[in-house]
Amino acid sequence: MAEAASGKPKAEAKTGGGRFSPASLVLIAIILVMFFASYFTKADVSGLQIHPMKQFVVKPLFGGKELAFYTPTVVTLWMGVAILAVVGLLVLGTRGRAIVPSRVQSVAELLYGFVYKMVEDVSGKDGVKYFPHVMTLFVFILAANFLGLIPYSYTTTSQLAVTATMALLVFFGVTLLGLYKHGLGFLKIFWVSGAPLLLRPILAIIEVISYFVRPVSHSIRLMGNMMAGHAVIKVFAGFAGVMGLGAVAPILAITAVFALETLVAFIQAYVFAILTCVYLRDALHPGH
Amino acid sequence: MAENTKAGEEAVKAAEAAAEAGMPQLDFSTYPNQIFWLLITLVVIYFVLSRLALPRIASVLAERQDTITNDLAAAEELKQKAVEAEEAYQKALADARAEANRIVAEAKAEIQADLDAATAKAEAEIAAKAAESEKAIAEIRANALEAVKQVARDTAKEIVAALGGKADARTVSAAVNARLKELGS
């Protein structure tokens, strides 16, 4: 205990490299600029007019009202940034292929090992074949969630269209995989062979309902978590905007919620991925 | 069909109302756009991962595992060598001890033999010397006896002469001899 406590400041001093690293100076400068800029752009904030849901509006990136399916929107932008983040972490970060990894490479390896072990443990050995698919969903959601925490960014995973599409992809992918692997034997998933014979039809009905509700819970869980956290932050930010310099309590509240949201950003990506693995296991081994 | 579209329109209206009320997520007019870009994103990430990132990380991890396994094997080998070296050292030590003991025993035996020979020689010499001494003593004793005889004869002659007799040399010496024989016996 004492050793860990004494070891920590040393490590911080090492990574900090002096009192202020360039990155922290840039961050402080950005915060100051935003703080003063907010006083000049305050014109459109009048009274207690807080619109916590406005941040989720899908706006075309280059103006205009038309929204064809190919129009680049703010969603497109931040999905693109998510791709860049994934490429930066998992491709550029590992380009050294070092036996003793750099920091970025060890994070990439950590993510790889984490998801690989999850797929192997939850879905079984034969589920490892679908590891790239689970990894794709996991890193996309993780990148989108964390990018959404950057002020003035956009959280693509707070959109029902996005999470529902992913949940339906998983649902149909897993169902078709089960039918392809086991044919009609896949329907055993609804037939609880461990229960008394009399109860089995009733249980089968419940199982069928729960099976088809899966994509709903799968998608709304992620979207709801992301939306709620950001909306709460926005509400507190509205209070802070009204109170001006005296807004100590709202800023503390924002800090607390932000910390919680950082946790939620990871946990929800994890939950989405592990549920995908669970569904995958059901498709690969339908018997109860 | 007509009912469907009507229901759809109603749903859209409801969604628009909901969006205005506060949930832009339920604005279905943005769905095709979002789904389109999401699918592109997922496909791009999937190909980047499955073609580039995942095989690379897997190979790095496998390589590291190999390196660790090899290093462990090498360490095991070195440890084995150290154990062998220690055994050889202990054996050499034991051999050296045995050799030393043997040499000590040999030296002791040699010394003992030399000592025995020297003792025997010394004893022989001592015996020889003792015999010689005895002989010398016997000689001295014989001489002494002779001298006593001579002194006794002369003394007896002188005494006889002093008493006024004339001593016959032969008689005196016979008397002395007889007296000495008496004393000696």
Image: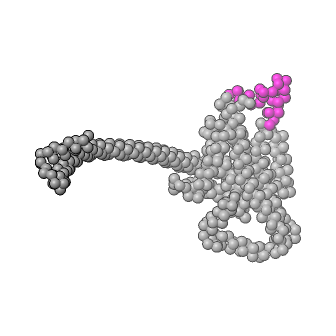
**Quadrant location of the C terminus of chain A?**
top right
Residue A146 shows up from this direction: yes
Residue B51 shows up from this direction: no
**Quadrant location of the N terminus of chain A?**
bottom right
Most foreground residue, B157 or A98: B157
Q: Quadrant of residue A62?
A: bottom right
Q: Position of residue B175 (x, y in %)?
A: 18, 44
* Prevailing SS of the magenta stretch: helix
Q: Position of residue A61 (x, y in %)?
A: 69, 61
Most foreground residue, A176 or A204: A204
Tell which residue pokes out farthest to the top in this image: A197
In magenta segment, residue A199: yes
Q: Position of residue A144 (x, y in %)?
A: 69, 55
Most foreground residue, B104 or B147: B147
Q: Position of residue B127 (x, y in %)?
A: 25, 44
In the displayed structure, A39 sits above or below A196; it is below
State the residue at coordinates (71%, 38%): A279
State the residue at coordinates (47%, 46%): B79
Question: Which residues are the magenta region?
Answer: A183-210
Q: Quadrant of residue A195?
A: top right
Most foreground residue, A267 or A242: A267
State the residue at coordinates (68%, 32%): A285
Tell which residue pokes out farthest to the front in this image: B164
Q: Quadrant of residue A26?
A: bottom right
B115 with respect to A77 (left or right): left
State the residue at coordinates (51%, 53%): A99
